[in-house]
Amino acid sequence: MNNSVLIIGGGIAGIQAAIDSANMGFQVCLVEKSPSIGGRMAQLDKTFPTNDCAMCILAPKMIEAGQHANIKLLTYSEVLSVEGEVGKFKAKIKKKARSVDEEKCTGCGICIEKCPWKADSEFDAGMGKRKAIYVPFPQAIPNVPVIDREHCAYFLKGKCRACERFCEAGAINYDQEDEIIEVEAKAIILATGFDLYDPTPLREYGYGRIQNVITAMEYERLSSASGPTAGELKRPSDGKIVSDIAFIQCVGSRDVRSNRYCSSVCCMYGTKEAILAYEHRPGTKSTIFYIDLRAVGKRFQEYIQRAEDEYNITYIRGRPGNIELNRRNQNPTIWYEDTTTGETKSLEVELAILCQALIPPRDIQKTASILSIELDEYGFVKTPDGLSHPVDTTRAGILACGCVHSPKDIPDSVVQASAAAARAAEILSGGT
Amino acid sequence: MTLEDIIKETKTYYCLECGKCSSLCPISRHNPSYSPRLMLEKALTGFEGDLINDQELFSCLTCYNCSLKCPADVDYPLFMQKVRTLAFAQGRYGVPADSGILQSFMRLMLNPAIEQRRLEWLSDEYRISEKGNILFFVGCAPYFEFAFEDFEAGALNIAKDSLKILNTLGIEPMVLADEKCCGHDLLWTGDVESFRKLAEHNARIIKESGAKKIIFSCPEGYRTFKFDYPHYVDLDCELQHITEFLAENMGKGMLDFKEVKKKVTYQDPCRLGRHLGVYEQPRKLIEAIPGIELIEMEHTRDESICCGTSAWTNCDAYSKQIRTERLLEAKATGAEMLITACPKCQIHFRCAMVSKGEEKGPDVEMDVMDIVNLVASALEDNGSE
């Protein structure tokens, strides 16, 4: 295989960079570690500031990347090593065994239907279940299931084989092994995105202890029509549909005890999630606790204004101190200072949502060492010449875009992805 | 030290003015006119006069609930301590508890002409040494006994039982007759000059005693020696709270407890817990006593609630509300007894139970005991068996 650009990470940034490069006539190898491309954006219900359906924007791009003659997709795959230098990189990629033959599978889904074993769904942020043989979400590309060997009874106990029995295409292959693929590339674009801050260490907010305190990604899945509750905002403790909720900003960001940086998208996604609550159930009351409302993008401030005017959303300037549990009704009670008046008060709501920070991918150190690139003090990719070469990493020929560079929203990720593709084209055309 | 120095030292410059401190502050939750964030803002915006004359300057319990969770790592209690120093220099000291009689005792100790009869309680029952490596710092317990006549303060019993336990372990510590107050309360009231004199006196006599290790039953003394003395005096001794010392010895199989059938809960004193980080040893000790069931309160360890007064800078209706709520929380566990590890927590909780005035509040009656007394009672008679 002789591809010219290797793109690592199949989220919106990686997909955009792949499409741009491919449309410029370059050969692209797009490597994604999970079973489908799509990334974080696929998990989102809507996007700000237009409330567009995330999947409606993403799915056509996923299909384009999946069908493009110049793009080779390697999903469920990981880069093991990269050798060489700009213009002649050689990468070893492990294509993990899906236990399903991609050529034979028709994507009918009978295997999933018949599989009796369940595990927590990563796509639903643990709020729902998936089968041991699964595609992460209905629009997955490729639409080929994988067997999660850690939860499959056949792999664990040697019994079951239900999927094999029902698969008319004969695509199930329990003996499939990991494959090592070598790829040549003149440039590499890193777009492995982000992980989400786990708020458990901030014990004052009760995450993990108070059932009706959830993270923003968990909320995102609850509010999504493709989520575990089919879009009904049912809270975890008793399944009650909520109509009085609160969002807490800067959970795991702007805090010396976790991350000092501003996570940049939380004020906006919190607002979007509050708007969605109202759209799901008109009349729903949302309160957003913030320190500084950062609405710096195009039409963002107007979005906030609409949230206040049309969606029954109240913004309170103050970072809450802690959340306590009302044992009678399982409601979280949020203690805060309204810093505009100096009063310390409490607010009881039915559901509290922690707007968790975006953090570097948990395996970023490994990635950085494979690529021999440097990271910044927070673990995001270092781009030393931020003004004139904003997507260049510390190693020539390796570029970065999207949230692996720093937390940013979808439009900014797409812009940066296009920038990385253009920069790669410059290298591929013999420039430096 | 100027206000600007204080701002630098306590990292107030980094304040995000987010109000997390205020929302965690036990005082702010009851007293609508007190906001730690606003105090810092006054300093940052240069209103030094307003800050020093603020009627709430002495309200802060310095309990560290705010600072431990501060996203900018501002040391608010230290900020308070230092700003109070500026205020004290201008003759301001708030409205101290019990009309300031306790601070008066402490200042009286500065007068070399007044001879203390500090160890009059020490009977032959207790074995102490004239010379040795280990010193037991008694603290102000004998004074507390006198100041709180209207209810049993119990502070002296803590000192007595501490000696009893040490004796059981075969330790005969030194106890100094001319020991003086550690200065904790004066430091936190802003009287840094008196504090310095007390510190110098104690450091001098301890050095002369030749002690290598000091054991405290009072977390305030321990904190003061550990964090504050090094800025004023030169004293090189190992310091330990008695719970740390006992937990260490328990591991060596030195303590043989008899059964005490009781459900108890434990109050983390601010100084021992959030200031010094000692959470586990007291629990380890309590749970080592057979028959004891330890039930934690809703707010526990670093989230524990203060007993409502610190350094006796202030004791008002809000203090009483805080300790009433805390006692109700302790009772809600179903425990028969509240164990604490600070003589002042014990005094404050017992005080809250003494009905004052016409208005009858909720029933907060509950046995309160220091951990030292509990351990001593579990050791009784075991020595002769």
Image: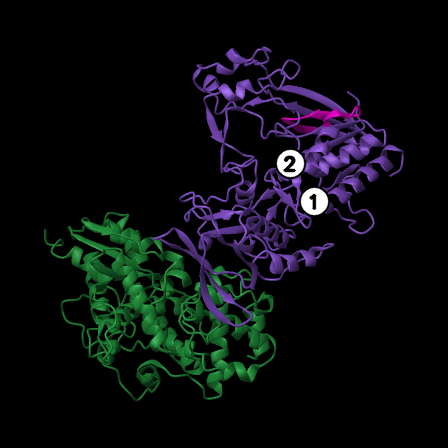
Chain colours: A purple, B green
Q: Does residue B182 appear anywhere in the picture?
A: no
Q: Which amino acid, by three-letter code, is at mark 1?
A: Ile
Q: Is residue A367 above or below residue A103?
A: below
Q: Is residue B274 above or below residue B103?
A: above
Magenta stretch contains residue A412: no
Quarter of the image where one finds residue B188: bottom left
Regarding mark 1 in the picture, which secondary structure is present there?
helix
Considering depth in this image, is B162 or A178 the residue closer to the camera? Answer: A178
Q: Residue at x 63, y 26 (%)?
A: A76
Quarter of the image where one finds residue B266: bottom left
Q: Are marks 1 and 2 in contact (CB under 8 Å)?
A: no
Regarding mark 2 in the picture, which secondary structure is present there?
helix
Considering depth in this image, is A98 or B80 the residue closer to the camera? Answer: A98
Q: Residue at x 46, y 68 (%)?
A: A344
A323 lies left or right of A259: left
Disc nearer the start of the sequence (1/2): 2
Tell me whether marks 1 and 2 sit on the same chain: yes
Mark pair 1, 2: CA separation: 12 Å
Q: Chain of mark 1?
A: A
Q: Chain of mark 2?
A: A
Residue, far front: A282
Which residue corresponds to mark 2? A39
A432 lies left or right of A38: right
Which residue corresponds to mark 1? A410
Q: Which amino acid, by three-letter code, is at mark 2?
A: Gly
Residue A400's spot in the image, x, y percent?
Answer: 74, 41
B14 lies left or right of B193: right
Which range of residues does the magenta coloring cover? A66-82
Q: Residue at x 54, y 83 (%)?
A: B50
User: Could you classify mark 2 by the number of other residues whose Cα lies within 10 Å: few (under 14), some (14-19), or many (20 or more)?
Assistant: many
Considering depth in this image, is B239 or A75 the residue closer to the camera? Answer: A75
Residue B290's spot in the image, x, y percent?
Answer: 19, 48
